[in-house]
């Protein structure tokens, strides 16, 4: 079995940051240095902007990037398929592969990016690996990176503000810090380009902004129904 240890280190770039996060970033850089100049240049930019002496801010940037009023999500099946049944099929397939290769998914779903990267690290060479890279991982990372575009972020903010009536305050007054997690995604894509024959662009299969807007509309509809029932109104 081959072991691509640099993917295990790259997976650590996307975990919720704790006090040791700067060391994890340095470890990832060491694993790429000498063989991945483009990825190292991008990771160096990430390191320069990293608020490594302000863990709380870093955690807030992570949360705003991937979890709450998020720019994107680390669940790549959702990135590719939204709530379509195809995501369920992908999760089932990934669960089987994780089990066969002893990948511990922790509390996250099988399509969570760090879990997928840990799987890539141990998959044997062959059609399954190539399909995982070309059909799943690379297209998802490409779409996730695109979500950090300024116009996309503005549109998501508008959607969140319409639904929640307010926006959570940005973690930093420096815009580049608030979007710094685009750099690990760019690093990962650069590594994939070096390791595998992947396309530079991909057909978009789903739209994160459309998906969250639909979810918000559905939630609003449920709230209206529940309010009517609580007030004893006829629905």
Image (spheres, helix red, strand yellow):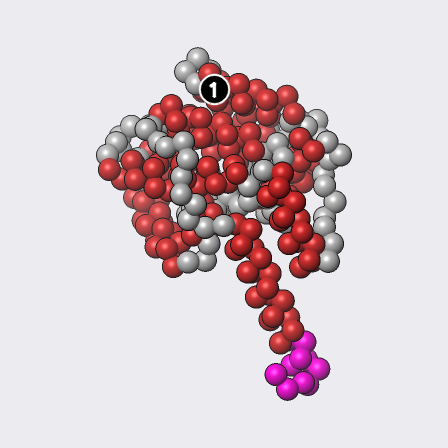
At 40% across and 31% down in the image, what residue appears? 200
In magenta segment, residue 234: yes
Image position, residue 143 (x, y; %) = 48, 41
Look at the image and tell me in which quarter the C terminus lies: bottom right
Looking at the image, is 63 positioned above or below residue 82? above
Image position, residue 100 (x, y; %) = 30, 44
Q: Is residue 198 left or right of residue 43?
A: left
Image position, residue 109 (x, y; %) = 45, 49
Q: Quadrant of residue 163?
A: bottom right
Looking at the image, is 71 positioned above or below residue 179? below
Q: Is residue 64 left or right of residue 29?
A: right
Tag 1: Cα neighbours inside 10 Å, few (<14), some, or many (≥20)? some
Q: Quadrant of residue 88?
A: bottom left
* Magenta segment boundaries in residue numbering: 226-235
Q: Secondary structure at mark 1?
A: helix
In magenta segment, residue 4: no
Image position, residue 150 (x, y; %) = 63, 38
| Residue placed under numbered mark 1 in the picture | 38
Looking at the image, is 132 positioned above or below residue 229? above
The answer, for residue 155, to whether it is visible in the render is yes
The answer, for residue 18, to whether it is visible in the render is no
At 63% across and 48% down in the image, what residue appears? 155
Q: Nearer the viewer, residue 31 or 37?
A: 37
Looking at the image, is 94 positioned above or below residue 218? above
């Amino acid at each position: 079995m081959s072991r691509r240890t640099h993917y295990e280190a790259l997976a650590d770039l996307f975990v919720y940051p704790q006090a040791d996060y700067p060391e994890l970033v340095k470890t990832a850089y060491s694993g790429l240095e000498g063989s991945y100049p483009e990825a190292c240049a991008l990771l160096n930019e990430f390191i320069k902007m990293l608020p490594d002496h302000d863990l709380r801010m870093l955690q807030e940037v992570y949360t705003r990037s991937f979890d709450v009023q998020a720019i994107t999500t680390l669940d790549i099946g959702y990135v590719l398929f939204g709530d379509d049944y195809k995501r369920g099929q992908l999760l089932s397939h990934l669960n089987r592969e994780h089990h066969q290769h002893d990948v511990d998914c922790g509390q996250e779903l099988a399509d969570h990016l760090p879990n997928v990267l840990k799987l890539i690290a141990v998959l044997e060479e062959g059609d399954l690996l190539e399909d995982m890279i070309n059909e799943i991982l690379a297209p998802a990372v490409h779409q996730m990176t695109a979500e950090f575009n300024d116009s996309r972020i503005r549109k998501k903010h508008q959607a969140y503000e319409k639904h929640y009536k307010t926006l959570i305050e940005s973690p930093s007054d420096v815009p580049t810090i608030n979007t710094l997690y685009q750099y690990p995604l760019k690093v990962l894509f650069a590594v994939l380009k070096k390791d595998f024959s992947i396309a530079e662009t991909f057909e978009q299969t789903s739209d994160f902004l459309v998906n969250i807007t639909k979810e918000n509309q559905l939630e609003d509809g449920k709230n209206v129904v529940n309010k009517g029932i609580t007030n004893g109104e006829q629905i």
